[in-house]
Image (cartoon, rainbow, N blue to C red):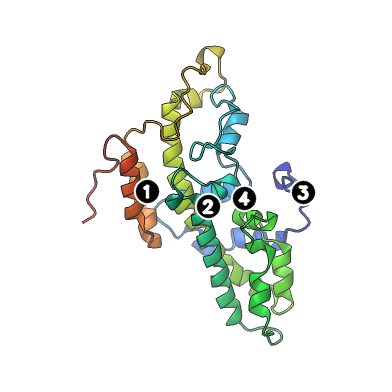
Amino acid sequence: MLPRFNSYSSTSDIDWACTKFCLINNKQFVSHRNGRSEFCGFHIKLLLDMLPTLTTLQRRKPHLYNPSWLCPQCNSFPETLDHLWTCPYILPEFSPLNTFKTLLLALRANYLDKFLSASSLIPLPDSFAAEFTALNCWDCDPFSISCLRLARGLIPISLTEFLGNYFSSLTIWSILDTPLHDFHFDLYVQIWLCRSIFFHHWESAQGITKKMKSSAHGPSSILLSSSKILFDSLTPFLATVSLDSWVSWVSSYIIRGGSWISHLDFWRRLTVQPLLRISFW
């Protein structure tokens, strides 16, 4: 078993067959033309815990990313993979934590509706809905291990075992498949893209350039001194976001019907110059 799957203790509580089915079977995986390849990459890296979070970058390039740095968005916790969904953010209104909870509960409701209307092997008991919503994979206050694994695309065996009392494996897998894909696309658009844009400008504020990041090794001459790293500020100077980044983000958000205008207004208030000079009307 790969070490990246052992970070939570035992992996025996993961339904690997269902996880594989949901990963490779969904034809919608290539249906989003805007940002398709980027989302596919995100989806795989999320599953394998290979997203370039700050803690990952600190391990890979400690000469560029000070090991003592915390999440740029909240400055309270290390930015691990799990922290992407639990970050309280500098503004609660735009908190990834609140966004994640909303998306997770929407996923649960979507699944419940589909299973209630699906053909079952035996009649569903009156307690089915209550038992389904009480499964620990939906626990997000505090977050359960199963919940955080589901966010990665690792299907908890507790979920499929419960559903297996009433439905065939094919029915279970087919229902879990597409909504989970949509859930991950929402995580990509509503949390990861926003975080990545913020992170890009945070890197610039620390003096970390693209050339420095592409260097295989970091000589001592490019180590960033503590006097240069003004990390006390939670809102470092942000320059204008590249046009391509915003077009990709807005296009993806429009596809999903999200409230992207409020996010653009938020980012515009954080920058010295307007972030986006595009007319969609």
Residue 251 position (above or below residue 129): above
How far is disc 1 from disc 4 in space, using C-alphas?
A: 22 Å
Near-viewer residue (140 or 114): 140
Q: Give the CA distance from mark 2 to mark 1.
A: 23 Å
Residue 134 % position (x, y): 67, 69
Q: Which mark is residue 9?
A: 3
In the picture provided, is 117 more to the left or to the right than 20?
left
Contact between marks 2 and 1 (CB within 8 A): the answer is no
Q: Earlier in the sequence, mark 4 or mark 3?
A: 3
Q: Tell me the residue that label 4 is attached to.
A: 47
Q: Which residue is mark 2?
A: 97
**In this view, 97 is above or below 217:** below
Disc 4 element: helix
Amino acid type, callout 4: Leu
Give how far across and how far down residue 137 sits, in percent.
Answer: 66, 62
Q: Residue at x 69, y 74 (%)?
A: 163
The residue at which mark 1 appears reads as 248
